[in-house]
């Protein structure tokens, strides 16, 4: 696969740096455009455009860190901070709007009830995305 436009969903987990390095390798060989987004989920009891200072600050820091890492790997990363009711829907909608042919999401290694836990957002992106989806799952740390 030679993607032309890649959407990277940055959640601020420990898996993000490894995922960005993987995306850099994919994007550089394909000369693809890369868009990194972070979605702030807004609770239903708040207006969608509510000013959520701690979350906005964290999101800006996260995107700045991702941009710095991307620069170190030679990747040109465009970043965007979004607010939405549901992160998965925002990721898929952005991929459609930006005509992305690959969405990359990261999953830190987590177990719930003895089984590896994928998470609601990753699962919903997989189910609803009209393009290819690559999930980078972090290895288990011991």
Image: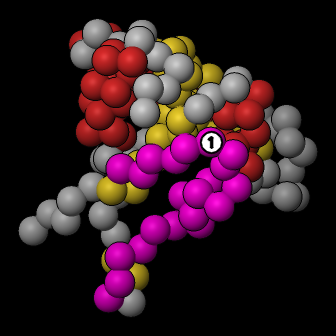
Residue 121 seen in render? no
Hey, which residue is sitting farthest front in the picture? 1
Residue 44 seen in render? yes
Please tell me in which quadrant of the rendered image residue 76 appears. Answer: top left
108 w.r.t. 104: above or below: below
The residue at the point 34 percent across, 69 percent down is: 110
Q: Nearer the viewer, residue 95 or 108?
A: 95
Quadrant (top left/top right/bottom left/bottom right) for the N terminus: top left
The residue at the point 86 percent across, 42 percent down is: 48
Q: Nearer the viewer, residue 4 or 111?
A: 4
- Residue 93 is situated, as x and y percent measured from the top left of the image, at 75, 39
Q: Is residue 97 magenta?
A: no
The magenta stretch is 114-136
Judge left or right: residue 9 versus residue 48: left
Judge left or right: residue 109 versus residue 66: left
Mark 1 Cα-neighbour bin, 10 Å: few <14, some 14–19, many ≥20 = some
Judge left or right: residue 118 versus residue 137: right
81 w.r.t. 127: above or below: above
Please tell me in which quadrant of the rendered image residue 74 appears. Answer: top left
109 w.r.t. 90: above or below: below
The residue at the point 39 percent across, 18 percent down is: 30
Q: Please tell me whether mark 1 sits on a helix, a strand or a loop.
A: loop
What residue did someone put label 1 on?
131
The residue at the point 38 percent across, 89 percent down is: 113
Q: Looking at the image, how many numbered discs can be counted on the residues?
A: 1
Quadrant (top left/top right/bottom left/bottom right) for the C terminus: bottom left
- Residue 129 is situated, as x and y percent measured from the top left of the image, at 67, 49
Hey, which residue is sitting farthest bottom in the picture? 113
- Residue 41 is situated, as x and y percent measured from the top left of the image, at 69, 49
């Amino acid at each position: 696969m030679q993607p032309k436009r890649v959407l990277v969903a940055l959640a601020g987990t420990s898996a993000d740096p490894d995922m960005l390095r993987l995306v850099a390798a994919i994007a550089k060989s394909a000369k693809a455009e890369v868009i990194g987004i972070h979605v702030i989920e807004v609770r239903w009891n708040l207006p969608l455009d509510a000013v959520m200072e701690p979350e906005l600050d964290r999101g800006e820091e996260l995107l700045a860190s991702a941009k710095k890492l991307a620069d170190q790997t030679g990747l040109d990363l465009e970043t965007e901070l979004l607010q939405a009711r549901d992160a998965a829907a925002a990721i898929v909608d952005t991929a459609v709007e930006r005509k992305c042919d690959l969405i990359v999401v990261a999953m830190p290694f987590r177990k719930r009830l003895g089984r590896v836990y994928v998470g609601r957002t990753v699962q919903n992106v997989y189910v609803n995305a009209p393009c290819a989806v690559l999930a980078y799952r972090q290895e288990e740390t011991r």
